[in-house]
């Protein structure tokens, strides 16, 4: 099933999130209809859309400026094939990977490198 | 840096185990392992709560390798972040490994240790070469842990997966050069109880240990192999860590 015909809410319903490995204060509720995962204290919300991937970054309910990160999305298909997409900073805490696609069964890993100190954050999502 | 690996074959398991020469002179020497520091994955050099200066020992590292969840290699490196080295990669990791050649050490009757062979200190009471290895599992283990190239000594879960609750028994197997290692000393909690009486592996290289922490676990195996340079040291001490994290309840 292609995700491109799906509404954001339905697309989010096709995601499940790998086990959360850390917890911090703040809401774990997605703010944009995506799926969320914590990486340390950073919350990563991921939503595939017809235009590509969208990711929002926040910490303790406060948005983090997207231009503070270098970011990449890596899609691993069920057969192990990998494809990476650089992500671009958008408005506010939004990062996008235009044209990125994740087939059913794929795993999508979001890698964020903070420009200030090179600290890494990861989110891992699987597309049903 | 990249590496390759192999899974232990049934042939290897059927072969005679390689036995450690003798109990380690001391189990409370230093090892390397990985642990989370300020949300990053750091390489630790130390013993117990002694988290020593790993940055100035980075020149002794012989490899740093990363693996995805299929155990395919991914590009990783260590970068210095203040006083600690941390793993740097833009690829998701399922595991990371490191190896360190800590060199030749002798202990003289005055109690002093020297970074030299007994060819330079003929009165040495202890002379050894020391090798250290670390494997860290990121997230929950799915399947088996393969034997990694460049890790002559490795401690792995003997079963697929790791018990997820503090106190559960965990069976580990220690390998030396791909063969089960008999009489290797296994420490179940190298960080919080470094002076514990080690559990020795049997002829199949197996030891059953308790899972000690609902959090960071550092299991260390110690094995002593024959010298390959008798003029300089009596034996080679291999010290291998397997570290993993059990999740805590949601806040």
Image (cartoon, rainbow, N blue to C red):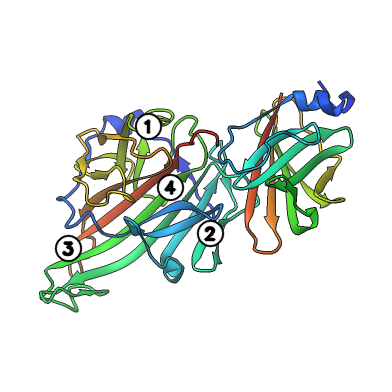
Q: Is residue A39 visible?
A: yes
Q: Mark 4 to mark 3: distance in Å?
A: 27 Å
Query: Is residue A10 or residue B55 the one in the foreground?
Result: A10
Residue B9, labelled with which disc? Answer: 1
Host chain of mark 3: B
Host chain of mark 4: B
Quickly name the residue at label 3. B234
Q: Sequence order check: which comes first, mark 2 or mark 3?
A: 2
Residue B86, labelled with which disc? Answer: 2
Q: Mark 3 to mark 1: distance in Å?
A: 31 Å
Given contact means CB atoms under 8 Å apart, are the residues at marks 2 and 4 in contact?
Answer: no
Q: Is residue B152 visible?
A: no
Residue B18 located left or right of residue B61: left
Q: Residues within 10 Å of mark 2 (few under 14, many from 20)?
A: many
Q: Mark 4 to mark 1: distance in Å?
A: 20 Å
Q: Residues within 10 Å of mark 1 (few under 14, many from 20)?
A: few
Quickly name the residue at label 4. B135
Given contact means CB atoms under 8 Å apart, are the residues at marks 2 and 1 in contact?
Answer: no
The vertical placement of A5 against B191, above or below, is above
Residue A9 located left or right of residue A125: right
Q: Sequence order check: which comes first, mark 4 or mark 1?
A: 1
Given contact means CB atoms under 8 Å apart, are the residues at marks 4 and 1 in contact?
Answer: no
* Residue B165: image location, x then y, percent: 40, 30
- Name the element at disc 1: loop
- Name the element at disc 2: strand
Which quarter of the figure is the C terminus of chain A placed in? top right
Q: Residue B49, located in which quarter of the rendered image?
A: bottom left
Q: Mark 2 to mark 1: distance in Å?
A: 33 Å
Residue B37 located left or right of residue B228: right
Number of numbered labels in the structure image: 4
Q: Sequence order check: which comes first, mark 2 or mark 4?
A: 2
- Name the element at disc 4: strand
């Amino acid at each position: 099933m292609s995700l491109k015909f799906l509404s954001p809410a339905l697309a989010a319903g096709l995601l499940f999130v790998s086990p959360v490995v850390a917890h911090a204060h703040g809401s774990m509720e997605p703010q944009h209809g995506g799926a969320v995962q914590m990486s340390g204290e950073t919350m990563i919300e991921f939503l595939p859309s017809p235009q590509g991937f969208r990711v929002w970054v926040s910490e303790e309910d406060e948005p983090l400026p997207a231009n503070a990160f270098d970011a990449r999305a890596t899609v691993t298909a069920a057969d192990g094939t990998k494809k990476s997409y650089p992500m671009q900073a958008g408005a506010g805490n939004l990062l996008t990977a235009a044209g990125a696609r994740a087939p059913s069964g794929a795993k999508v890993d979001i890698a964020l490198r903070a420009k200030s100190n090179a600290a890494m954050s990861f989110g891992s999502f699987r597309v049903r | 840096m990249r590496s390759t690996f192999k899974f232990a074959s049934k042939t290897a398991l059927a072969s005679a185990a390689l036995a450690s020469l003798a109990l380690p002179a001391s189990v409370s020497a230093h090892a390397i392992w990985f642990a989370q520091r300020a949300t990053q994955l750091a390489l630790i050099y130390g013993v117990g709560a002694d988290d020593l200066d790993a940055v100035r020992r980075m020149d002794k590292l012989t490899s740093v390798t990363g693996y995805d969840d299929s155990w395919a290699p991914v590009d990783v490196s260590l970068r210095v972040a203040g006083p600690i080295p941390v793993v740097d990669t833009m690829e998701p990791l399922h595991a990371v490994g490191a190896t360190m050649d800590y060199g030749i050490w002798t202990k003289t009757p005055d109690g002093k240790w020297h970074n030299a062979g007994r060819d330079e200190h003929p009165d040495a009471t202890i002379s050894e070469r020391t090798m250290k290895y670390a494997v860290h599992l990121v997230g929950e283990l799915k399947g088996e842990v393969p034997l990694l190239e460049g890790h002559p000594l490795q401690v792995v879960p003997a079963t697929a997966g790791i018990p997820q609750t503090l106190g559960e028994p965990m069976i580990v197997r220690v390998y030396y050069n791909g063969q089960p290692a008999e009489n290797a000393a296994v420490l179940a909690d190298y960080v919080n109880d470094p002076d514990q009486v080690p559990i020795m592996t049997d002829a199949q290289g197996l030891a059953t240990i308790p899972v000690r922490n609902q959090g960071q676990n550092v299991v260390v195996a110690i094995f002593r192999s024959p010298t390959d340079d008798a003029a300089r040291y009596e034996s080679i001490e291999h010290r291998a860590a397997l570290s993993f994290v059990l999740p805590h309840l949601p806040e």
